Image (cartoon, rainbow, N blue to C red):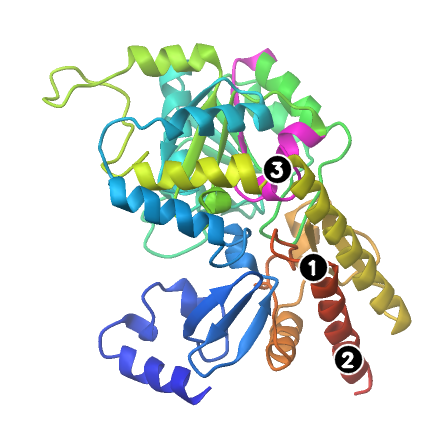
């Protein structure tokens, strides 16, 4: 990869770590690849090496690269204008598709799931008159100030630097711990519980059978809003965790790949909360103080046009079923490869999502999940795979079957895995 290395050296003169976004260097302990182009389930670096992608851009490129139908839509919309700062008709079709998936009748749009979560918390505070937020250890809800914290038993600890003082009113409990949830909610200071139906940023942690229904019941009983973050899980199964587990949240947030790679965030809510938003409108002069919502490029014509075609034509229920089957084949193959090499490992599985649990039992919370992961194993695996034309997932998640993958792609992945375990176990 001499051209990637040369570009990285040159780029250090104008970008920290030689990359335009810190994650592009921080997520990898190997030199950064520079990409030339992508097509379908593969991308090609500037040195001409092609990789079968099972990272799918951390759900942002789950549709695949350079989909021809999406290219048509982008060109057509560009010819009409990509940003209007007024409503476009595509918004109606996107709202209907999201309603079909998640059951909520009213929707708003941002440019990322991070900003969707910011707005969800602001609406929750306006609706309840409360300030506190309950989160779960192991979560990831984007780069917002209030959620980048964990609790190690002695108060909030930042998950990154630059965050300042711990926010007041943020409480973190263990996933699957309903008793811990109730201890917080019974004080009736909590505006919202913000939860992923399945934890996806520490491997994959599934909810216990009664956890999400119990969470819904407690939120109703104590006057707290239930906000479910479907940013990742909406691509694992049609309707994500909300539909799979039959939960009726007050707010759903999401985004990532529903625009086919074009930035978008989504925020769904009940009719009651939509009335709160309507009554909380501000004006451009600041004479009427409203809820702090919106952004200049939110709900732009290009992102909505892309989301319309992706949701109506490309990420159909049948396609979701197909990718879920691929995810099952992937998980079965990981467990079979481990058994064949005498390893007592399990595979994470939730629809199209899989991954590695390096212990005999699947985790129930973040603490158990972190014990079951090994970043050095993930690094070694990803380098081995990359040298054989497969781009594996970042260490905290995946691999993940995407809409551009087929059975043959999964077989290629599992074949490289078998070779990797042969070498690893021979030493």
Say whether residue 78 is left or right of residue 329. left
Q: Position of residue 243 (x, y in %)?
A: 66, 28
Q: For the point 46% across and 12% down, which residue is it?
A: 271
Decide which of tag 2 and tag 3 comes sooner along the chain.
3
Q: Nearer the viewer, mark 2 or mark 3?
A: 3
Mark 1, other Cα within 10 Å: few <14 / some 14–19 / many ≥20: few
Numbered circle sitting on residue 316: 3
The one of 221 and 345 positioned closer to us in this rendering: 345
From the viewer's perspective, is the residue at label 1 or at label 3 nearer? 3
Where does label 2 land, which residue? 419
Q: Nearer the viewer, residue 196 or 253?
A: 253
Mark pair 2, 3: CA separation: 35 Å
In the rendered image, which residue does mark 1 sit on? 371
The residue range painted magenta reads: 221-244
Q: Identify the image quadrant of residue 425.
A: bottom right
Graded by Cα atoms within 10 Å as few (under 14), some (14 to 19) or many (20 or more), the crowding at tag 3 reads some
| Residue 11 colored in magenta in the image | no
* Image point (31%, 28%), residue name: 88
Q: Is residue 281 visible?
A: yes
Q: Give percent across and percent down for residue 308.
A: 45, 35
Mark with earlier residue (1, 2): 1
Q: Mark number for residue 294?
A: none
């Amino acid at each position: 990869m001499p051209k990637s290395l040369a570009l990285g050296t040159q780029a250090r003169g104008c970008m920290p770590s030689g990359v335009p976004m810190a994650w592009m260097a921080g997520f990898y302990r190997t030199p950064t690849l520079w990409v030339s182009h992508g097509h379908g389930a593969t991308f090609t670096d500037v040195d001409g090496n092609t990789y079968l992608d099972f990272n799918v851009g951390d759900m942002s490129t789950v549709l695949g690269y350079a989909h021809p139908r999406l290219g048509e839509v982008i060109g057509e919309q560009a010819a009409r204008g990509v940003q209007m700062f007024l409503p476009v008709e595509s918004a109606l079709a996107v709202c209907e598709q999201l309603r079909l998936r998640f059951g909520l009748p009213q929707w708003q749009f941002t440019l990322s799931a991070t900003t969707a979560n910011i707005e969800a918390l602001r609406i929750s505070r306006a609706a309840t008159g409360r300030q506190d937020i309950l989160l779960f250890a192991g979560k990831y809800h984007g780069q917002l100030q209030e959620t980048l914290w964990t609790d190690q038993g002695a108060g909030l600890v930042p998950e990154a630097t630059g965050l300042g003082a711990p926010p007041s009113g943020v409480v973190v409990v263990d996933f699957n711990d309903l008793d811990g949830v109730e201890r917080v909610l019974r004080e009736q200071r909590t505006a919202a519980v913000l939860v992923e139906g399945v934890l996806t940023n520490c491997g994959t942690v599934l909810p216990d059978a009664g956890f999400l229904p119990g969470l819904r019941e407690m939120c109703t009983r104590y006057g707290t809003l239930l906000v479910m973050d479907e940013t990742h899980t909406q691509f694992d199964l049609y309707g994500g965790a909300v539909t799979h587990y039959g939960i009726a949240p007050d707010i759903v947030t999401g985004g990532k790949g529903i625009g086919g790679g074009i930035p978008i965030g989504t925020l769904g809510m009940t009719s009651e909360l939509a009335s709160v938003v309507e009554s909380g409108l501000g004006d451009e002069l600041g004479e009427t103080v409203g809820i702090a919502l919106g952004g200049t490029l939110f709900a732009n014509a290009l992102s909505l046009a892309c989301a319309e075609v992706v949701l109506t034509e490309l990420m159909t229920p049948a396609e979701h079923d197909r990718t879920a089957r691929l995810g099952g084949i992937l998980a079965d193959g990981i467990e079979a490869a481990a058994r064949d090499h005498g390893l007592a490992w399990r595979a994470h599985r939730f629809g199209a999502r899989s991954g590695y649990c390096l212990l005999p039992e699947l985790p129930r919370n973040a603490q158990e999940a972190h014990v079951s992961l090994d970043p050095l194993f993930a690094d070694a695996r990803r380098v081995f795979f990359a040298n054989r034309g497969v781009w594996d997932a970042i260490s905290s998640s995946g691999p993940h079957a995407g809409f551009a993958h087929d059975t043959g792609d999964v077989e290629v992945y599992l074949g490289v895995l078998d070779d990797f375990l042969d070498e690893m176990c021979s030493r």
